[in-house]
Amino acid sequence: MKKLIKDEIRAVLSEPNGADKLANMNVGQDALLKTASEMFIEEGAASALLARLASSKRMLIKMSEDEALKAALLNNLGSESPKLRRNCARLLGALRDPAFAEALTSALSREETRFVRPSLLLALGAVGGEKAAEVLSRYEVVPPKDVTENKHFEEEKAALVMARRSLAPKTEHVFSGLKAKETVELRAPYKLTHQLAGELSDMGVASFDIRQDSLKVTTDDYPGLFFARCFTEALFPIGTSSVDPAAIAGKAVPFMERLLLSCHEGEPPIRFRVELSASLPEEVSRQELVKRIAEACESVALQNSPGDYEAELRIEGNMRSARLYIKLFTFKDTRFSYRKESIPASMNPAVAAAVLRFAQDRLSVGARVIDPCCGSGTFLIERGKLSPCASLTGVDISHKAIDIARRNTELSGVPAKYTVNDILRFECHRPYDELIANLPFGNRVGDHSSCEKLYKGLLAKLPQLVKKGGIAILYTMEFTLLKRLIRETPRVTLLSQERTEAGGLTPMIFILQVD
């Protein structure tokens, strides 16, 4: 990935919504944060970029470990620039350290610029502690001097309410079940929704509106849906709206209040956050728009709490026509809880389950199965979850991967065994019935040259690893390379193939038979 130098960062930041542009660029986020932090510490620059990066929990953790950055944030609360003071308040609030309360209190007492005060109030509410609680309890918003201050006066009042509310004891709401049938949209790997539909049908659940990456069901048994393994997430569709805070609130708030209050135990408000995935024009700031939507959706029953939420208002699509959804975080999805650890190239377990369902007609109960590039064990574990197997054997050249696979497998309850070895040197005394593999494809592991060597060697060795008439399921992004090598390899027949999607990539599934 490209690493931006300071002058390049300055140039982009000078553009409209430059912080959003930088955060969305295909550049290393760790390096971007490091450079932005240096710019801020040295010259008080790039605060807007730091505020944008703070929306990532991983980036926020890194900021919290940077003592020089925290000292610079506290020092710049006294900057001559109101925008810089506001951004510093926002970042200190995001870091949530009660030790910042004294500095924030002092900054609030001397702040004369109306539009900075809401950020200071919200920061005090976020950092918490006795000092913050005392200040917020006695703080009074000064009435506007004239009509030009009305907007900022209202923002300051709203911020004070939110800050006080954030310090109030939180009610943890418990999911108690749906009280009536609701439509639920299940997201599936691209072009593998029919596999999910088949899995649901086996459970007695009918699907409708089946698309390439989603389908819908109507149910009052929400937990029962999680016996299916071929979907990545479950969402409650609300409807469509333009990406306008008032329009979204008008559509979403009645639905959220009805659904969330009916299926949870505990007094309101229920805490939510806004996730804006819609494509936006260049001149629109995503961060500011999210803030306005969240404020518009707050009510007696709903509290915006992006750092501690129980539900998510998801917005997808574009400015004119966005799809609105609710995602619950009060119901714990334990389907893949065995996967406590992973490696960079690990397969999404729902994708693994769906890929295996795609090949299910070719698989057999009681099969002996080998995974020659098993990584953290996900593909092999999901094969064991699909149907009983006589044996499950994982092979990987990485000691770290095998250690992780063993730990994950122990938690899964699937009786798989693992060995550290190069599959091209691995000797088996008896060919397996099935071979399944999420092959390295040069993105996070290896490169094109190493992939070609591995693929060619593996295909040539298939007749030794898999019995005659046995099946191999290969999943890779290097599908052009694999197609060519399959054509060049004797005793191997391509039975089926399908393109899918995972993490922004478009890998392909190949089902082969050993002749």
Image (cartoon, rainbow, N blue to C red):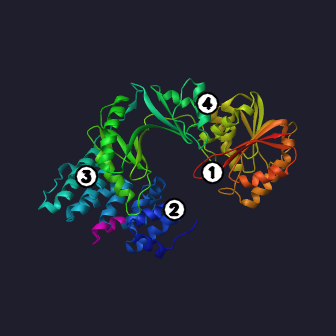
Callout 3 crowding tier (Cα within 10 Å): few <14, some 14–19, many ≥20: many
In the rendered structure, which amino acid carries the disc numbered 2? Gln
Was residue 75 drawn as part of the magenta stretch in this picture?
A: yes
Q: Earlier in the sequence, mark 4 or mark 2?
A: 2
Q: Earlier in the sequence, mark 3 or mark 4?
A: 3
Task: Give the number of the mark in front: 1 or 3.
Answer: 1
- For label 3, the residue is 159
Real-space CA distance between mark 1 and mark 3, rounded to the nearest whole angstrom? 44 Å
Number of residues whose C-alpha sits closer than 10 Å to that of mark 1, classed few (under 14), some (14–19) or many (20 or more): some
Dot 3: what SS? Answer: helix
Residue 448 on image: x %, y %: 73, 60
The answer to whether residue 40 is seen in the rendering is no
The quadrant in which residue 264 appears is: top left
Q: Which residues are magenta?
A: 73-83
The residue pinned by badge 2 equals 29
Depicted 247 relative to depicted 279: above or below: above
Residue 506: mark: 1
Between the residue at mark 2 and the residue at mark 1, the CA separation in whole angstroms equals: 23 Å
497 left or right of 41 in image: right
Q: Marks 3 and 2: in contact by CB < 8 Å?
A: no
